[in-house]
Amino acid sequence: MRTARGLPFVCNKTLKTIMESVMARVQRDEKVTLCHFVWMGNHAHIIIVVNDTAQCVRFYGELQKQLTDALKRLLGFKHLNLWKKNGTSVIRYRDVDTIVERIAYLYANPANANLVDCIERYPGLNSWRAFRETLASALAEYSSNIPWIRAPYISKLPSRSLTEAQDRAYTKKLCNKAKAYHSLTLRPNAWFAVFGVKEESEIEEINTRIVERLREFEYEARIKRTLKGWKVKGARRLKEEAISLEHAPKRDSVRIYVYSIVKDIRIQMLEEYTEFCRACSHCYDRWKRGDFTVDWPPGALLPCVPPTANYFDC
């Protein structure tokens, strides 16, 4: 998920508390299974296991709406177009090696963006701790009891950039107003079941590969910074950064629908996706002609039923 502009998801305690609250609230009915996530300044990377297309759409749709509502209250806005139109990519993965690469890449994002040297030093909202504490068991869970920060409880910030004392005081005020809690549950190893991996020794070995690949990404980013004479921004500066809506991305990212580092699998997935789109177009065309007996392909999110009545103005 990517914002249209700005860097609203700063690393201070206030934003992290609100963002965690929103995630826990949206996930209270377990729409999807959360495995891994990292929130950057203007986008999020989230690895999930999905059993139902509509629930997946509800998950990221509600997440976006509640975050928008919270930011409107924080900034004192009546209206805010926060998210990039069609800026959410739900990407399918089909092999273990690709998942290893993508999870490592997810946790390497802060280092690749020259924010910190390694994921352990990143103060932004992420699931690294949950991952490190659940390396072996397929059924391992990491749960936190999160206060539900309702939008009416959120008042306008005294400044878009909070001092450490202001940050602590505002966060404490939000938590004291909370009347209910939701459990934010992560299952970092739930994705293994999709590929039939059940042995704890194999799960631990694959997770070790993820950590090793992450360190390679971080090392490459470190070498690149050294050659160019750059330094990381650092955790302290990140915590003190102001909420910004002025930042404009250098370029639009390419939308990806399927991904695999294995060429043959990637080609097969692209062919399947092309056929899936063709089948959906055919079904919708039949719907527009009044034929609702057609079977949509599995995984399709059905559009609104087109009107079937004619209107004559006599």
Image: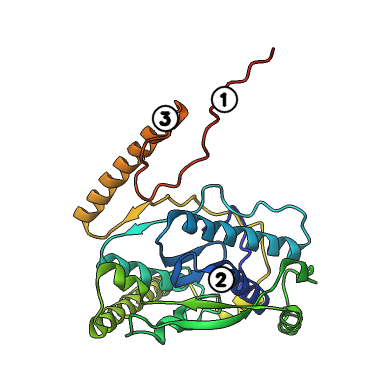
First in sequence: mark 1 vs mark 3: 3
At 49% from the left and 77% from the top, the residue drawn is 185
**Residue 2 visible, this angle:** no
Identify the residue shown where x is 32% and y is 76%.
210
Residue that mark 2 sits on: 28
Mark 1, other Cα within 10 Å: few <14 / some 14–19 / many ≥20 = few
Against 17, is 68 above or below? above
Q: Mark 3 points at which residue?
A: 291
Using the rendered view, name the quadrant where residue 171 is placed: bottom right
Q: Mark 1 points at which residue?
A: 309
Q: How crowded is mark 2: few (under 14 residues within 10 Å), some or many (20 or more)?
A: some
Secondary element under disc 2, as helix, strand or loop, is helix
Question: For the residues carrying marks 2 and 1, which lies nearer the camera in this image?
Answer: 1
* Mark pair 2, 3: CA separation: 38 Å
Amino acid beneath label 1: Ala
Name the residue at the top extreme: 314
